[in-house]
Image (cartoon, rainbow, N blue to C red):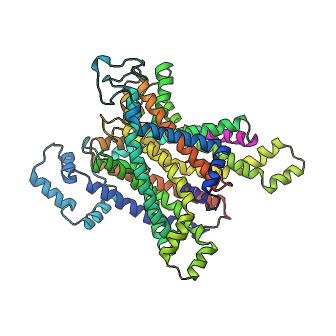
Amino acid sequence: MKRSEMDTSSVKVTNSFPQLSGICDLLRKNLTLTAGLIIFFALLLITVLAPVIAPHDPAEQDLELRFSPPSSTYPLGTDQFGRCIFSRIVYGGQISLAIAVISTIACVLIGVIVGMYAGYYGKLDAVLMRTTDIFLAFPSIVLALPIIAIVGPTPLGIIIAITLPGWAKFARVIRSSTLSVKSNGFVEASKAAGASDTHILFRHILPNCYGPIIEIATLGLGSKIITITSLGFLGLGVQPPTPEWGTMINQGLTMLEKAPMIAISAGSMIVLFVLATNLIGSELRTILDPRSDTIVI
Amino acid sequence: MQAIVIHRILQIIPVLIGISIITFLLVSLAPGDPAEISLRAILDTDSPSPESISLMRAEMGLDQPLHIRYFIWLSRVVQGDLGYSYLTHKSTVYEILYALPTTFILAVSAMAISIIIGIPLGIAAAIKQNGILDHFCRFFSIIGNSTPEFFMAIVLLLIFSIELKILPVAGSGGFQYFILPSVVLAIGLIAITSRIMRTSMLDVLEENYILTARSKGLDRKTIISKHAIKNAMLPVLTYMGTQFGWLFGGAVIVESIFALPGLGRLTVDAVNTRDIMILQGCMITFAIIFVVINLLVDLSYIYLNPAIKYEEV
């Protein structure tokens, strides 16, 4: 399990996470982080404001206008049913982003509980860490596929299929943060003052883990988008006619010669989104732990 | 050291048990009656009689409670009996052994490509830190990491198969069918490899023995080629070993796009056709490959670096 070992070992808890007042200054100095944040929020805005931005209804078909080239009414042309590709791209992020956000929150919650208890109570550590080993032994898509086969390719099914293999990495990162916070003097002091374990865990240890949690959650959001769109690409994700980037690429693949725009524009949106999360995540890592190099996983 | 090795080997036992439990639970939750599926394969008929199905259910222990069924199932799996395919009526073990070489060739060639390109790229980036190549390497690594395999595959397909027409679109048959798939898999890996090689080189170049070599008057070229690269390689190689398991996951997508008849495609097809026995076999195979590779990597790490203090991770 060297890979996760390297992941977790590079996350060290420092108190250099900036306060609100310092953030503007930080953004001015760190252009990579700023670029990542701008792309991220631009995509988020486009997705949320899709009904305003999109010139057409994403499901509206016009069979007389099949495969029409880009024009002023159809900025990216139309697909095999005469639907506006641009509108479908704009709407295509909604469901993927919603699923990614929900499953990332679920992974954080499970990861915080498992990771903190494993790090804080030595007795549980071995059992919980062997459990993460089991989940990390399957490539995430290999564990997601049978879950989809059981639950079906519904949004809830996809959330389960992504959360179940995903929480283990979060638990490992939070465990190693907990271990390093635990050795601090203030935990000892709090214990000596008679604080309960729950108080120490949620009042002292958890707030000191916020940095690493935000960092892995950002990176996790990107990798979840990749898994969701991969499932869509395999035809096992969000089902048509709902516009979704991965499903659009799946359909675009068969028409690659005729209408390469479908696959290329949907793919570019995925790359942009993951790029943004990778830029933010890797910069956060450098800020939190200046000694580590940015290895984006 | 012997104790460490034994401890590490024993550690995989609970993981293997856990893998078997997860696979068993997922398979028993899946729709479809395994007894009926097996009968169709054995009798080579599409509608086995209800009496024979209930007999088969009893023989397979499907009328038992879940935990007993698990042990019955486990004893069959340990003996190499993974059931039969619902569609082809062939044994799961046969299908997997038939698919494994394709995936293996794919993974090995992707690994080879990423070593040949990624390691020199990382070394060059480290030697001229913050130079043009270093920035290019960083840019490439971020882009490579942000692009899902299936999109990378489509871009390369458009360029090399549709525009230039120099490589086949998809299928299997010869060497040329492996070029695009392994390049697609390799790109993500090159991005990581070159980054780690760069970091490792920079670390080594700060070491005392490099300073000693420099103060002895050795020129930079000799220091880098004789001392730095050799020492910087170890963490990279161990890290790449663990990435081998990751490659098998990537193969699921890549094999589906390029229609390569490997383990990944077998898995996706099994989900699409609800071929439960094949699916369970694929899951177990993927997990065992991953666990064994990680074991080998850890053992080689202990062997190559005897000073390692073994910690519970």
B246 part of magenta stretch:
no
**B38 to B88, vertically: above or below:** below
Observer-nearest of A9 and A97: A97
Q: Can residue B312 be seen?
A: no
Number of numbered discs visible in the structure rendering: 0
Residue for point 64% across, 74% down: A185
Residue A121 in the image, given as x and y percentages of width and height: 50, 74
Q: Point out the image quarter for the C terminus of chain B.
A: bottom right
- Please provide percent x and percent y for residue B149: 48, 37
Point out residue B49 in the picture as x, y percentages from the top left corner. Answer: 10, 49
Looking at the picture, tell me which residue is in the foreground, A128 or A48.
A48
Q: Quadrant of the N terminus of chain B?
A: bottom right
* Residue at point 51%, 31% (across, down): B179
Whether residue A92 sits left or right of residue A121 in the image: it is left
Up the image or down, B311 lies above or below B220; here it is below
The answer to whether any part of residue A279 appears in the image is yes
Which one is in front, B139 or A190? Answer: A190
Residue range highlighted in magenta: B114-128
Does residue A295 appear to the left or right of A62 in the view shown? Answer: right
Residue plotted at (40% across, 54% down)? A163
Q: Residue at x 41, y 17 (%)?
A: A69
- Say whether residue B259 is left or right of residue B310: left
Instruction: Assign the magenta stretch its main secondary structure.
Output: helix
Q: Is residue B225 left or right of residue B247?
A: right
Q: Position of residue A210 (x, y in %)?
A: 54, 60
Q: Is residue B120 magenta?
A: yes
